[in-house]
Amino acid sequence: MDSKNQKGQILIEIAIIMAFIVLVIFGALVQLTKIKDRHQQYQFSTGVNHGKMAPIQNRN
């Protein structure tokens, strides 16, 4: 009986650790999304236009 209790306790500990890892990853993704949104808002407010082509000007 004792070995079954130990196996059950190990499985519970593994499940808790896995849940903690998933929580940390989810929190990191949320923070990255917030940082990206703030960066885009800053670029919009300053008029920075990275990664886009300049408008074509007529040379006639």
Image (cartoon, helix red, strand yellow):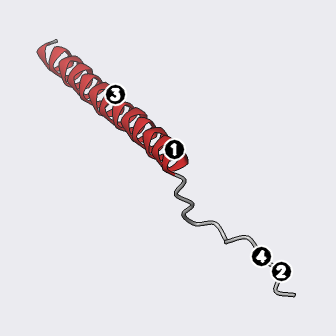
Disc 3, SS:
helix
Q: Residue at x 24, y 18 (%)?
A: 8
Which of marks 1 and 4 precedes in the sequence? 1
Q: Quadrant of the N terminus?
A: top left
Tell me the residue that label 3 is attached to.
23
Which callout, 1 or 3, points to the residue nearer the camera?
A: 1
Question: In the rendered structure, are the residues bearing label 4 and label 2 in contact, judged by CB atoms less than 8 Å apart?
Answer: yes
Q: Residue at x 24, y 28 (%)?
A: 17
Which callout, 2 or 1, points to the residue nearer the camera?
A: 2
Tell me where residue 31 appears, x and y as whole percent: 37, 35
Tell me the residue that label 4 is attached to.
56
Q: Residue at x 34, y 27 (%)?
A: 23
Q: Three-letter amino acid code at disc 1?
A: Ser
Q: Quick check: 18 left or right of 26?
A: left
Tell me the residue that label 2 is attached to.
58
Q: Quadrant of the C terminus?
A: bottom right
Tell me the residue that label 1 is attached to.
45
Question: In the rendered structure, are the residues bearing label 3 and label 4 in contact, judged by CB atoms less than 8 Å apart?
Answer: no
| Distance of label 4 from label 1 (alpha carbons) | 23 Å
